[in-house]
Image (cartoon, rainbow, N blue to C red):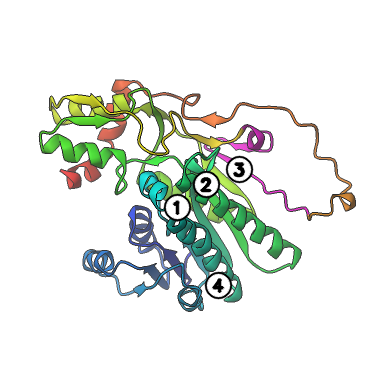
Amino acid sequence: MFTKKIVLISGGTGSFGTQMLKSLINTKVKEVRIFSRDEKKQDDLRRSITDKRVNYIIGDVRDYRSTLSCTQNVDFVFQAAALKQVPTCEFFPLEAYKTNVIGTSNIIDASIHNKVKKIVILSTDKAVYPINAMGISKAMMEKVAISKAREISFKKINCSICVTRYGNVMLSRGSLIPFLIGKIFKNEELTLTDPSMTRFLMSLEDSVSLVKEAFVNGKNGDTYIQKSPAATIDNIAKALLIIFNKKNKIRIIGPRHGEKLHESLCTSEEMTQAIDQKKYYRIPADLRNINYDIHNKKRGLFIPKEAYSSNNTKILNLNELVNLLKKQNDVLERLI
């Protein structure tokens, strides 16, 4: 599907972007463009992946001219550029808005202008019932993406926009597990916010598979969610101590700014429309226009369903969690 195609990954030096790039260079892709604003991360990635088909572009999704330039002649776009640290976004909510909402809007508009065929937008479980600036900005980003999907549907533009939602991507940069591993090997106590907090768990490979699923099978306006297990952060810390045979003390410090006890990947309302595809949920967008009187098709009664959340999915016990983390051994070794 990527043979002789040009693919753009915005925010391409992040954990997802790097993993997606590694996947793409194993295909017959014509060119992969890595678009981001951090020249140091680009230089590190350039030195580690020397494939001549990879083109590194410095720019910022906040700048429409940058997005317009980098999307020229591009076939497919994966929009991963984001501010994603919850406490940082709480202190600088306007910056989260600029990157996550305006930046994504710029990427979509530039892509449509340059006749990109498909755009996949990366979102997060924090966009569901959001209580923090990061989640609110991502929720608005999703609304912008669906609005533009509706617009291109009305205008019959040959483009498709899909959204993917993630839980916690294990071992991604800045996430809980690398943070705890750093403390383990410095022989420091492990600080946990609330031991009963639950979080969805996905591997980096899962994140790429989810995006590819949306890319291959998603229809314009679809949101894709991968069914994922979850774990308490207390068991995550204990599992890491077992894996590394360490005995660091654990200290509870209370929730950080904007943190939830549990996360959700799909609202109760969305679950009434969600299509179960075994490994994934696909949520079709409501692409009707605002004039409801012209729509004759009945959508059925609203039948409440339980939201899909990290406290009602499969909760991994300690042994299951140890086994899951050991499967990520190649990444764990790089963090030591």
| Amino acid residing under circle 1 | Pro
* Callout 2: SS: helix
Q: Which of 251 and 49 is in front in this view?
A: 251
N-terminal-most mark, 3 or 2? 2
Q: Rounded to the nearest whole Å, what is the CA distance between mark 4 and mark 3?
A: 26 Å
> Mark 4 Cα within 10 Å, few/some/many (few <14, many 20+)?
many
Q: Which of 309 and 105 is in front in this view?
A: 105
Image coordinates for residue 214, horizontal then vertical, percent = 55, 51
In the image, which disc is placed on residue 288? none
Q: Nearer the viewer, mark 3 or mark 2?
A: 2
Measure how far apart labels 1 and 2 are at the Cα level: 9 Å
| Residue 157 included in the magenta stretch of the image | no
Which-is-in-front pick, marks 3 and 1? 1
Which residue extends farthest front?
91
Is 285 included in the stretch rendered in magenta? yes
Mark before the other along the chain sequence, 1 or 4 = 1
Residue picked out by circle 2: 136
Q: Answer whether labels 1 and 2 touch (C-beta < 8 Å).
A: yes
Tell me, yes or no, if residue 232 can be seen here.
Answer: yes
Is 165 displayed left or right of 251 in the figure?
A: right
Name the quadrant containing residue 199.
top left
Q: Please tell me the numbered disc located at residue 110.
A: 4
* Sequence-first disc among 2 and 4: 4
The residue under label 2 is which amino acid type? Ile
**Alpha carbon distance from label 3 to label 1:** 30 Å
- Residue wearing tag 3: 282
Q: Magenta region: which residues?
A: 268-288
Amino acid beneath label 4: Ala
Q: Which residue is drawn at 30% across and 24% down?
A: 235
Q: How far apart are marks 2 and 4 (CA)?
A: 24 Å
Instruction: Choose the circle earlier in sequence order: 1 or 2.
Output: 1
Q: Which of marks 1 and 4 is in front?
A: 1
